[in-house]
Amino acid sequence: MASIFGHVAASSAIGYTAFPRNFNTITFLIAGFCAFAPDLDVLAFRFGIPYSSQWGHRGWTHSIVFAIVFGIVITLLYKALSPKNTVGFKTGLFFVLSTLSHPLLDMFTNGGRGCAIWWPFSTERIFFPFRPIQVSPMSVGGFLSEWGIKVLMSELIWIGVPLMALSLIVWWRRKFTIEI
Ligand SMILES: [Zn+2]
């Protein structure tokens, strides 16, 4: 996994850059949850499911199919519970993309197994060829150590800086577009 910070930063950047002025804070928070949710699969270890299993960590929950289904389910729940009922296609797309950003970021990490991104069509674990992001520990204890600092520094460089640059470009472009 990348850390929860890296995943939530990715979903926020998607919301800001791809969907201008569409969403409120609650929608961003739910998207942040979507971006982190695939890692709830670490619970599989408690049930004795091995890492290498398609049902284990970075297995089925780290796939395109899961991102689509999970994003749609969360959208339908949000729509049912939303008093203003402003939840529509764009919200659903935001949630799907936020969920999908998770395995894509994990595939840039330098540790663990790859992601079963093509599940259920293939259970092969896949990484990108370029893997600069320091893999995050799975426990809070592990994160509160030198390893955690390494992870945060790595994510600042490889996730934070590119996303900030992209957001600034989009912000500047919107400002410029409004002015002309
Ligand atoms: Zn993950």
Image (tube, rainbow, N blue to C red):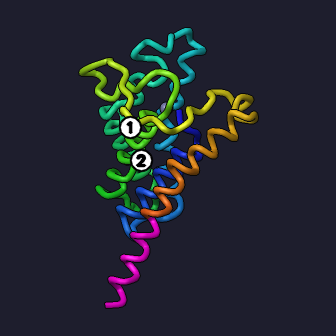
The secondary structure type at the circle numbered 1 is helix
Q: Amino acid at mark 1?
A: Phe
| Of pointers 1 and 2, the one earlier in the residue sequence | 1
Instruction: Tell me if the residue at label 2 has its CB under 8 Å from ligand 1.
Output: no
- Image height check: is 55 above or below 89? above
Q: Amino acid at mark 2?
A: Ser
Q: State the residue at coordinates (31%, 34%).
A: 64
Percent position of residue 178, x then y: 35, 86
Q: Residue 88: where, in percent of width, then height?
A: 32, 57
| Residue at 45% across, 25% down | 58
Q: Which residue is mark 2?
A: 98
Image check: 145 left or right of 29? right
The answer to whether marks 1 and 2 mark residues whose Cβ atoms lie closer than 8 Å is no
Q: For marks 1 and 2, give the CA distance.
A: 10 Å
Q: Main secondary structure of the magenta part?
A: helix
Q: Position of residue 122 (x, y in %)?
A: 27, 19
Mark 2 residue element = helix
Q: Residue furthest bottom?
A: 180
For residue 136, what is the image quadrant? top right
Range drawn in magenta: 167-180
Q: Is residue 108 magenta?
A: no
Vertical side of 32 occupied by 49: above or below: above
Q: Which residue is mark 1?
A: 70
Quarter occupied by residue 84:
bottom left
Q: Quadrant of the C terminus?
A: bottom left
Q: Nearer the viewer's eye, disc 1 or disc 2? A: 2
Q: Residue at x 41, y 22 (%)?
A: 59
